Image: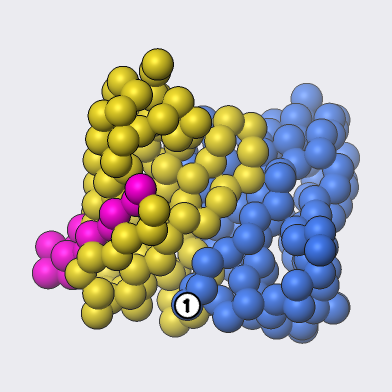
Chain colours: A blue, B yellow
Amino acid sequence: NAGVTQTPKFQVLKTGQSMTLQCAQDMNHEYMSWYRQDPGMGLRLIHYSVGAGITDQGEVPNGYNVSRSTTEDFPLRLLSAAPSQTSVYFCASSYSGTYYGYTFGSGTRLTVV
Amino acid sequence: SQQGEEDPQALSIQEGENATMNCSYKTSINNLQWYRQNSGRGLVHLILIRSNEREKHSGRLRVTLDTSKKSSSLLITASRAADTASYFCATALGAGTALIFGKGTTLSVSS
């Protein structure tokens, strides 16, 4: 039982490049979320999904796209990376949304130069 | 805007002492959750307290909830060096959708 798996763990991008951060869970959780964590800012919600085919915006969605074609996967796409997107990104999942605790991945540290 | 705000931002104590951190939130909630984050790691769920509960215990953790004041507190008793971490409270963005986190309290426990 791997839980929530995020890949890659580290990534350096040049401004303007695109990339996809992968998130996969093997717990059959319907609810998944993406967060970014910056020093002194805590975690801020980027996008979330309440099931396959259903996504919605969080607190800071600009510059990011998501899709949820399967229950297991919830990729986060940066279409044109900017230095302001330098951050640590966390994916999380839950069996029944906020009525239960969330399981977090170990994070992706992204640097945009 | 972030729903929960923890206080204090940083806390330094000696091993064996108790650590108390507080969380205030803005809107009505179904439950409030506390998470721990060790340096460089993902968050780990500690405890969930529902809106109809006033106090909950889990091992050395004690959580209280005061819905009239929109506040919660996390007490860690007999702290250990391994409790050194950041602690976050979280509430729901909407009905069961996603969690919103505060900025966290950084706890340092020295031996």
Residue A108, x across and y down, in percent = 75, 41
Examine the image and state in which quarter residue A74 appears. bottom right
Q: Nearer the viewer, residue B34 or B2?
A: B34
Residue B61 covered by magenta stretch: yes
Q: Identify which residue, A78 or A16, lies in the foreground.
A: A78
The residue at the point 58 percent across, 80 percent down is: A96
- Report in which chain the residue with disc 1 lies: A
Judging depth in this view, the residue of A82 and B75 nearest the camera is B75
Q: Which residues are magenta?
A: B60-71
x and y percent of residue A58 in the render? 55, 64
Q: Residues within 10 Å of mark 1 (few under 14, many from 20)?
A: many
Q: Position of residue A60 (x, y in %)?
A: 56, 54
The magenta stretch spans residue B5: no
User: Residue at coordinates 38% horizontally, 58% vertically from top-left?
Assistant: B58
Residue B106, above or below A45: above
- The residue drawn where x is 23% and y is 65% is B55
Horizontal relation, residue B2 to residue A47: left or right: left
Q: Which residue is mark 1?
A: A99
Q: Where residue A80 sits: x, y (%)?
A: 80, 45
- Quarter in which the C terminus of chain B is drawn: top left
